[in-house]
Image: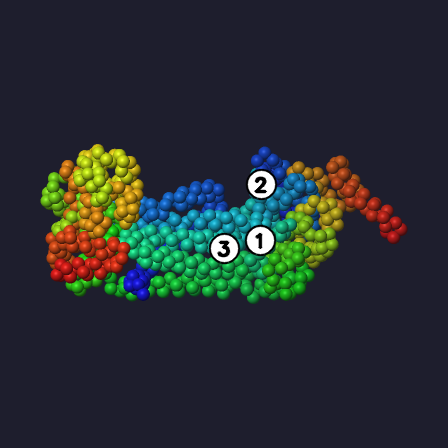
Amino acid sequence: MRVAEPIIELRDVVKRYGQLEAVAGVSLAIEAGSFTALLGGSGSGKTTALKTINGLVVPDAGEVWVAGERVPTESGPLLRRRIGYVFQEIGLFPHMTVAENIAVGPRLAGWAKADIAPRVAALLRLVALPDDVGARLPLALSGGQRQRVGVARALAAKPAIMLMDEPFGALDPVTRDQLGRDYRALHESLGLTTLMVTHDVWEALLLADRIVVMDQGKVLADAAPSALLAGHDDPRVRALMETPRRQVERVRELAGETL
Amino acid sequence: MDPRIDAAWALLPGYLGQHVLLSASALLLGLAISLPLAVAASRSAVVRWPALLVASLVQTIPSLALLALFYPLLLALSSVTKAAFGLTLPSLGFLPSLLALTLYSMLPILRNGVAGLTGVDPAIVEAARGVGMTDGQRLSQVELPLAAPVIMAGVRTAAVWTIGAATLATPVGQTSLGNYIFSGLQTENWVYVLFGCGASAALAMAADQLLGLIESGLAMRSRWRIWAGAVGLVAGTAAALAPLVVSGAAPARYVVGAKDFSEQYILAELIADRLQHAGASVERKEDLGSTFAYSALKTGAVDVYVDYSGTLWANVLKRTDNPGRAAVLAQLTAELKRRDGVIVLGSLGFENAYALAMRRSQAEALHIRTLDDLAAHAGELTFGADLEFLSRPEWTSVKNAYGLRFKAMPEYQPTFMYRALTSGQADVISAFSSDGRIAADDLVVLDDPRHALPPYDAVVLVAPKRANDTRLLGVLQPLIGKIDVTAIRAANLSVDRDTDKASPAQAAKSLETKLGL
């Protein structure tokens, strides 16, 4: 059987901040079309590892390859225009309308004006926002709507790879669940490769095909959600998976026969 | 209506135009330097601290001193450029004023620029990088638009400061609304002083409001506000500059200079009027600082003005001896011609000497007639000096010759120095012998038996480039030896007195009539 060339590859990546090794030798190969969760607590190095992929963080040692290209490349901006990036604070440009925010990527990539307007309209539909939102300023939107715009902006220039850093972390549980499922559907229909950083075990279990658990800059575990739930050598990983298990038990007890 | 108000209105187009030209140029230049510097400073702490520190230090220099400091600076620079490229820089007038005010305008723009740019939400900066903006795109499309309201607030502060400080450009030879204030202060023409303050305050407020309109437009993303503010600024500047463009079509042929006191204004008006009679066009440069006047003449920024032999003797030739009135004048004429090519055309016929004066009543009570008598009582007396006397070599020689040790030595503007004497706050002052107030205030001038003070013949000086200008010399020659001390005292008093004041131009007219010119 031929092994597919990974679209993203980290080889022994190290990043230090002063004395602290935020990423302490991480190797990772991500296949095209996969949905991978980088799971860990704060300070586990998951965000730093993610940002080495689009060149926002430059590693001190090791290599990062994206689509056969060594990162960081000579032109970071050109690389980042081909990779979608969504993060918790969203960072919508407050002085631009929603439509202008979404159009930033295509505009930077030099799309013709005539192609941009229909693209923005299509993206608003794709992320399930009404058309009239396009003319509004980000300040006039709810948190969930803003992150939908954030996802639309990241998708606008038709990237093959999406990097997401706690994308739904600041949303209420209902909106968060809705947006998560909507995004997973987009991931399928657009054939994306998604790498999502999260500290939420449930989110990782329910959205991803593969979970990479990180702690203190190192990879503790790397397996499918079902395999991780089934058990693991590392007690820290077992403890992590114990929580959802216990919560499911408790909910089942509460619901009694109905579940 | 008060005729002084009419006179003030008549001067407004020229003064306002120059004031607007100077402050707008300084502000634009300040903006052109500060904005890139603010960007660099917001990116790098290595640039930030030195830039802000230097800008803050500049701000601690009093603005008048900053303007004055550019004179020696440009003089030195000019000698370098002359040696290197054969180019000389004007060290008086527009250039030093522009540079000083530009420096002065930089701090608020720089400080607000750095605050505005570093204050942009880090998440927005991260998003800009994340979507693939280059550093330049991030600056122009995200950071500058977001920082614009804060930067504009800095520009407003800078505009108000610059317009206010531009009034101080007058003493370095740049016409501005400060001409009202400086000449008004010297001739006790409070209408002028108020008019100058009012005009510059109105100008500052108008600029502030229009910039404020742009600032609120940027903050509210309202295009019409931005446009209305910008159009208002451009139209206002153009309207203020129009009189300069119109008069610029016929450039003044002669520039007549004057220092900052009544006698100088009157003599400058007299010369200007004679030149106009001869069909020449004339520009006046008034309120020149005492040392600036001679430099302005030497470099050709001024064509003609009246100075005093003793002043030139001590300050330009650095002489401390006193060979007598005729010898001083003769040597001065030869030396200035040889050194600087400056023509000393001759004495107008009177002296305006530094003289120590007292109230007659007090002098008689203490039996003081001469400086020797004064020395015996100096310890109990207060000496009110004008702002430059104590730093002049004449004071050193008088002090040493008579051993003068006063109880206190406060310094005043000349106008207030006379007030201090009449009100008893000072007992002795450094008076001017041609001053009409000596007679009017019933003062006595103390004799100088040791001849410590040099003679101060009022002499007409002509710029080197006008040495062979027959029209100019033809107009000036008839004035030589014509004006006696009684005539000039009367003219000075008519301008300086409290009631029924004449303007310098009116005083010059009546002087002309009296002299039969």
**Which of the two residues, A116 or B300, is positioned nearer the viewer here?**
B300
Extreme-front residue of the structure: B365
Q: Quick one: SS at disc 1?
A: loop
Three-letter code for the amino acid on which mark 2 is drawn: Pro
Mark 3 → mark 1, Cα distance in angstroms: 22 Å
Which chain hosts label 3? B
Q: Is residue A23 above or below residue B115?
A: above
Check residue B148 in the rendering and tell me which mark sits there, or answer none.
3
The number of numbered badges drawn on the structure is 3
SS for dot 3: helix
Residue B287: image location, x then y, percent = 27, 52
- CB within 8 Å, label 3 to label 1: no
Q: Which residue lies under the disc numbered 1?
A: B131
Q: Is residue B271 above or below residue B91?
A: below
Front residue of this view, candidates B362 and A105: B362
Q: Are marks 1 and 2 in contact (CB under 8 Å)?
A: no
Q: Earlier in the sequence, mark 3 or mark 1?
A: 1
* Residue furthest out toward the right: A257
Query: In the image, A137: left or right of A171?
Result: left
Residue on which the image places disc 2: A59
